[in-house]
Image: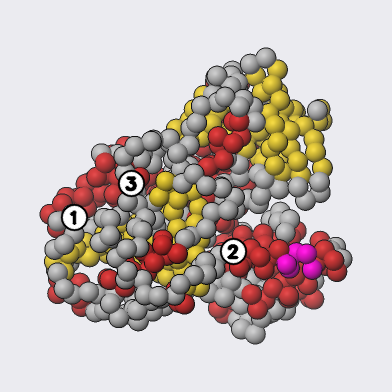
Amino acid sequence: MDSENSYDVAVIGAGVNGAGIARDAALRGLNVVLIDKGDVGCGTSWISSRLIHGGLRYLEYGEIPLVYESLRERRSLRRIASHLVAPIRITIPIYASGRRPRWLVRLGMIAYDLLSLTKSMPAHDMPSRDDMLKQLPGLEADGLRGGARYYDAQVTFAERLVLENALAAEAAGATLLTYHEVTGLVKSGDRVTGIDVHDTIADRRRTLGVKSAINAAGPWVDEVLGRADGSARRLIGGTKGSHIVVAPFKDAVSEALYVEAAADGRPVFILPWNGLYLIGTTDIRYDGSLDEVRASRAEIAYLLDETNRVFPRAALTMDDICYAYAGVRPLPQQAEGPESAITRRHLIVENTAVARNLLSIVGGKLTTYRHLAEEAVDALGGVLNRALPRCRTADIPLPGAEPVDSTEPVPRSLAPAGRERLESIYGTRASRIAELASEEPELDRAIDENGRVCAAEIAFAVRDERPRTLADIVFRRTMLGLDADQGRPLYPAIAAVAAREFGWDDAALGAQLEALERYSDSLKPPAGDQTSSTNSSRPRPGK
């Protein structure tokens, strides 16, 4: 056992919940190790609709406490992550054929406003049919009865929100171990005393001594529990959600749309995002491989159909998709009933049948991760029999929202669009990239023709943000992997800077580039019949 590193708590899973828990626990003085079998935020956290929202549709299922909690946490995130979380106006077109009449939508809007009385964003309004067509001239007019408009918030780069929580945890004293797969939980009597881990990059195995553990592995929660006790009861009944990303299309506007799908009544969001449009999501019970989750052609066709129905002149096809992503929501096990009715509340489960000092996190939303973490660490105090200080995460800004004293906020080699891009990704931490460019002139150069990306950004990622692979840098540090072209033209230039920073030889560099290409390719729509997506025999997600 690794006796030099005996931790108060091992947090398994570096998604938004795990990273938030690690940050909170470290800020309260606990010795924390945060473990993930991949990179930070590479699982469920990045496959969301990227909204920080109160959950308007949860009102329909009577989840009023969840809506209230979500609206309160939306306000907190606007404060502590102001560089990442921004208001977004959302419009709901209301059609005669819809399952929710105008009066019911209005009632929901009023309730939403009442539950967020302290919000700083405007209240809802209910535009008429004529106002809707004036605002959205390409909208389907047939059967349109009017609409509803309200404000929520969007986190363009959810990956950065997760990463900054992990980096803040590390700054508070936590140890971060990425690409460390948990291969076993060591027990002594009725307690977990060690975590067996395998560093899959260095191919090194060791056992970490621990006094407690929090299983925040998302859809992999049951898999982790099985490594402590093969008879552990099933906690997760995950549902698969898929999204597609397309370039601006005919009649597309800067408004975000919340559409009731004609196929099954589910909400579908059409969101302006990262200079593109993010469309999703689906909701299907899923029992397949958690490591190979892909958007199916049926799901993609469903999202295209609904978008084309609302914007008839868009005429989107499979060929218009830049990329698609999918993942599994770690919802509570519920064998019957519609997927949409499965609660989105989080549960903190005491796994006393497995070990008395083991907690598992079931469910959770991007919006409410901070409060979930607070509750989990409060519960951990009881497990450890320690009086912990109060939670401070609602008051302390994440790293990119912290004020800095710098006369060089961004590198001089960048064009204005490049400077704006850096600030939207890194917030005030962009000043560190400027410092590197100033200190090392060879890094103060653009690596693209448009002056959007400089070499100093890649060096900063390697030195300050804990990536271990090229894909980490492209998709979860610089965010270039989420551009329309997935950043592909820049792969060689990014790899050249990263190779110098990591000390990769030619063979290692070649392997990294191949792995990056495979990952990028995995986000392309699956090959298949390219016929029209109007075939009524197509299987419909969520039914």
Asked if the residue at tag 2 contacts the one at tag 3, i.e. Cβ–Cβ closer than 8 Å, the answer is no
How far apart are labels 3 and 1 at the CA level? Answer: 15 Å
* Residue at the (73%, 67%) spot, across then down: 514
Q: Farthest top residue?
A: 189
Determine whether the residue tagged by mark 2 lies in a helix, strand or loop: loop
Sequence-wise, which precedes: disc 3 or disc 1? 1
Is residue 536 rendered to the left or right of residue 24?
A: left
How far apart are labels 3 and 2 at the CA level? Answer: 27 Å
Which mark identifies residue 40?
Answer: none
Closest to the camera, between mark 2 and mark 1, is: 2
Q: Farthest bottom residue?
A: 449
Q: Amino acid at mark 2?
A: Ser
Image quarter where the N terminus lies is top right
The residue tagged 1 is 99
Task: Considering the whole magenta stretch, tell me its main secondary structure.
Answer: helix
State which region is magenta: 510-514
Looking at the image, residue 323 lies above or below residue 327: below
The residue tagged 3 is 340
Please state the horizontal and vertical placement of residue 451, each as a whole percent of the image. 63, 81
